Image: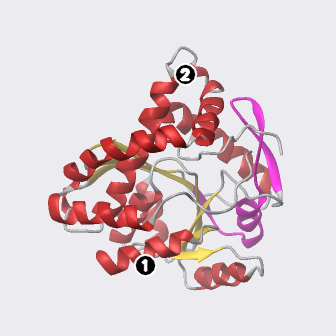
């Protein structure tokens, strides 16, 4: 996988402009703004385009597809998803709806005050899923590297209101492990992305589209050692104001390899169906 610094691309000023459009002119107007922004990103983010191209070439269902058109569409969908992530926190929230598959599993965890690890990936929108779960009374903690995410979270809270999740930032001093333990003790849900790692991190081997890939060991090791239920959770954009939510039945396992294999299997399925919403702009098939 391409080396990742743990920081995502994006500019706080740009987010602020989109928030202003959403609040003053509405979601469609913010989508319209993307027609001016997306081509710029498409032209200058050559490394991201290359990574998507290599990834898409490995997907059997895309064998005869126009990959460059799909890549541009992917960039556009990322923009729409980011707009929705902000819009659902405003008075536009009532316009959003979703169809769910497995939602009852997570509601049951929440009702029983059962802590669990929700494993996901940079595909679709975790923020939307978090907002849906918040409506059911669940507290979500998102474990991530990205220091920029805290700036965005503060921006959202300043311009819109309270965000729908708590960030547990991964640090070199391992203090995040204590925060994860505290969240578990408080009977909360923890979401971890398991599809990319930073340079030097421990990894585990799995197979996606019958090719070996390296996934971060951390998420699978945490699940296996804590001995609490885990579920694979995804949320995909279907159309304006409409999302599709899915969660697998919670399971227990003390073997990180088993969990990683199951994750790779379901991620292959989701990536085949929704390549236009694959927002991991690092080559997942690159050897470590």
**Image mark for residue 154:** 1
Q: Quadrant of residue 117?
A: bottom right
Q: Is 55 above or below relative to 130?
A: above
Coordinates of residue 11 in the picture (x, y in percent):
46, 63
Depth order, front residue of 114/153: 153
Q: Residue at x 41, y 56 (%)?
A: 103
Choose the circle earlier in sequence order: 2 or 1.
2
Depth order, front residue of 238/252: 238
Q: Is 27 above or below relative to 134?
A: above
Q: Circle 2 — which element? A: helix
Q: Residue at x 34, y 80 (%)?
A: 158
Coordinates of residue 175 in the picture (x, y in percent):
72, 83
Q: Are marks 2 and 1 in contact (CB under 8 Å)?
A: no
Quadrant where the N terminus lies?
Answer: top right
In the figure, is residue 132 to the left or right of 264? left
The residue lying furthest to the top in this view is 64
Q: Residue at x 77, y 76 (%)?
A: 172
In the figure, is residue 203 to the left or right of 56? right
Q: Quadrant of residue 256?
A: bottom right
Q: Circle 1 — which element? A: helix
Residue ID for mark 2: 62
In the figure, is residue 195 to the left or right of 37? right
Which residues lie in the magenta part? 203-231
How far apart marks 2 and 1 lie (CA) works out to 39 Å
In the figure, is residue 238 to the left or right of 109? left
Q: Is 236 above or below relative to 22?
A: above
Magenta segment includes 213: yes
Coordinates of residue 118 in the picture (x, y in percent):
57, 61
Coordinates of residue 171 in the picture (x, y in percent):
71, 76
């Amino acid at each position: 996988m391409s080396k990742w610094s743990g920081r995502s691309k994006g500019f706080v000023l740009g987010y602020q402009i989109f928030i202003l459009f959403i609040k003053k002119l509405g979601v469609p107007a913010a989508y319209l703004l993307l027609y001016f922004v997306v081509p710029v990103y498409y032209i200058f983010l050559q490394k991201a385009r290359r990574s998507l191209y290599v990834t898409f070439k490995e997907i059997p269902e895309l064998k005869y597809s126009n990959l460059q058109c799909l890549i541009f569409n992917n960039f556009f969908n990322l923009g729409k998803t980011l707009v929705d992530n902000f819009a659902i926190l405003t008075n536009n929230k009532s316009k959003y709806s979703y169809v769910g598959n497995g939602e009852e599993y997570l509601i049951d965890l929440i009702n029983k005050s059962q802590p669990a690890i929700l494993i996901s990936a940079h595909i679709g929108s975790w923020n939307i899923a978090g907002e849906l779960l918040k409506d059911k009374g669940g507290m979500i903690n998102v474990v991530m590297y990205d220091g920029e995410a805290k700036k965005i979270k503060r921006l959202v809270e300043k311009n819109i209101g309270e965000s729908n999740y708590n960030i547990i930032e991964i640090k070199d001093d391992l203090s995040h492990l204590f925060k994860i333990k505290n969240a578990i003790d408080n009977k909360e849900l923890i979401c971890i992305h398991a599809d990319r790692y930073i340079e030097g991190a421990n990894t585990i081997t799995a197979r996606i589209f019958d090719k070996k890939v390296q996934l971060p060991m951390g998420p699978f090791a945490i699940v296996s050692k804590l001995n609490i239920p885990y579920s694979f959770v995804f949320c995909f954009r279907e159309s304006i104001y409409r999302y599709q939510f899915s969660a697998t039945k919670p399971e227990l396992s003390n073997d990180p390899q088993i969990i990683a294999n199951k994750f790779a299997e379901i991620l292959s399925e989701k990536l085949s169906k929704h390549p236009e919403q694959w927002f991991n702009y690092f080559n997942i098939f690159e050897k470590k």
